[in-house]
Image (cartoon, grey):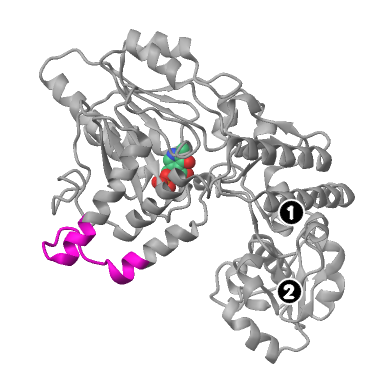
Amino acid sequence: MTDDIYLDANATTPVLPAAAAAALHTMQSLYGNPSSTHAMGLQAQALMAGVREQATRWLDTGTGRLVFVSGATEAIQTAVLSALCAIRTQRDCGAAVGRLLVYGATEHKAVPESMAHWNQVLGLHLALHALPVDSDGRHDLAALAAVAGDAALVCTMAANNETGTISDLDGIERVLVQYAPHALWLVDCVQALGKLPLRLRERRIDYAAFSGHKLYAPKGIGLLYVHADAPFTPLMVGGGQEGASRSGTENLAGIAALGAVFDALQGGSSFRDDAALLRMRQALVDSLREAFPDVLFNTPFACALPTTINFSVPGRASKDLMDVFDAAGVRVSAGSACSAAKAAPSHVLLAMGQPEARAASAIRMSFGPATEEAWITQACARIRRCGQALASAGPTHLPTDHGSTLPTASGPAMEPGTGDPAETAALEVHDMPQFLAHHPDARLIDVREAGERLAGGPLQLYGQATHHAALSELAQHCGPWLARPQAPLVFVCRSGARSARAAAMLRRMGHTNAWHLPGGLALQARQAE
Ligand code: PLP
């Protein structure tokens, strides 16, 4: 059961085949520089103009304009810089401007980080103000009304990347029109593209950020919408591309791919309709309820995108759930992809008032509008299997980094002059076949927890069955291994973290031939088939 069931579309999506074909065609045949004046340059220019026209129509931008950028982080950056430069100019001219940079408390980090960065770089000394959200994750409009009069810039997302909560943009607009007619307004539309009508022509949004890779285009292409009356300062200057709004040779392949995505949106046939998306969400929700009877859903479905489900299982840490899902080939995340490496509970769920324990056990499942129903059916079967695996495995108690559940070690595990025992014990993927050829007696030891092993089924690597010794129970297995401290042991796990700990522990206890595979099964599986 190693095929991926990818349920992490809010982190990124695969590239639509038509988009990949358009990018390839552009790279191979339409590779002129759009700034060149010869025929190939003109063809490239025409391609770009065509895609801009498609995007303009789909997003209904009215008199506003669209700038091709590398992605939403750049779009947000440019919008914040533009707004802050304008605020500085107004202030220098003695005009009364707000003192607050207001952002929704559940925004993607790109927003408050950009605000803080440019505020500091430009020496503005404005105050950042996190706008609270209610327990559904929607902006508190009364709180917005209370601060709007002092706001210079307001940033609110159209839909949340972790929970799928859809913002009340009409409500926010009403408050801004009434209390903050001069404040600039940036809307992060990343998760809304192709999923919600944005009505840019009608709304008084000054800037809107979009990212291609969240909707089946490749990474490295995005769009910034700028209202006709909104101030603008380029983030990058140089060759004057994009009408001097964004210098740098354009990512023509990405633009062509984005064009194919807009074609697909317009054509309608590649993307499922709302009824199908709701059916798919319901199927996933039903399977989660069956797998984890006490599951708690973290956003009311009525105000969330149908393609995002955020849930917690009481008593189970996100990391443990992710390990089991990953073992079953179901790729989910514990929050936003950029925070995935951080152990902290989700700032989004905390801002919604969820207790820390619930936020620390959250899992996000997200799929895209091009997902097939058959795929979701398979996902549901695996989710049920994960539930059964966890139920029969029981709780796990991992040893601490001090090795408290292992016999304390003495003895020289490492050669003189070496540092971290885990580093010493790393075996690179490409070295494995040779290592096994030289050490036919090497034992491959899977240190994942029982739930993961049950969810994923028996693990074969390099044609060998692996032995199982969960990290939480390693102490029980150490005796025979330490009796033969030169017999080669190779530890494996999901990501390489637990296997590194296992090898380091064994080496500290005097085993001289304990190894681990950095990168874990994620890197091994394809090599080892
Ligand atoms: N805003 C939201 C809501 C996102 O989900 C993301 C990506 O995770 C970003 C901004 C950043 O987008 P990009 O990867 O295009 O820079």
Would you call the spot at circle 1 few (<14 residues within 10 Å), some (14-19), or many (20 or more)? few
Position above or below: 361 against 218: above
Q: Which mark is residue 367?
A: none
Q: Please, is residue 271 above or below residue 94 in the view?
A: below
Q: Which numbered dot is residue 378?
A: 1
Q: Which residue occupies 83% across, 69% down?
A: 478
The picture quadrant for ligand 1 comes to top left
Q: Quick check: can you spot residue 60?
A: yes
The quadrant where residue 499 appears: bottom right
Question: Residue lying farthest right?
Answer: 392
Q: Position of residue 378 (x, y in %)?
A: 74, 54
Where is residue 368 shown, x and y percent of the image?
A: 56, 46
Answer left or right for 340 relative to 185.
right
Q: Is residue 60 left or right of residue 311?
A: left
Q: Residues within 10 Å of mark 2 (few under 14, many from 20)?
A: many
SS of the residue under disc 2: loop
Given the image, on which type of amino acid does mark 2 rest?
A: Gly
Q: Quadrant of the N terminus?
A: bottom right
Q: Image quarter for residue 62?
A: top left
Relative placement, left or right, of 53 versus 284 is left
Q: Alpha carbon of mark 2 to alpha carbon of mark 1: how far? A: 46 Å
Q: Quadrant of the C terminus?
A: bottom right
- Say if disc 1 is inside 8 Å of ligand 1: no
Q: Which residues are magenta?
A: 25-45
Along the line of sight, which residue is nearer the eye, 276 or 214?
A: 276
Could you tell whether 310 is left or right of 34 in the image?
right
Q: Which residue is mark 2?
A: 510
x, y percentage for residue 385?
82, 52
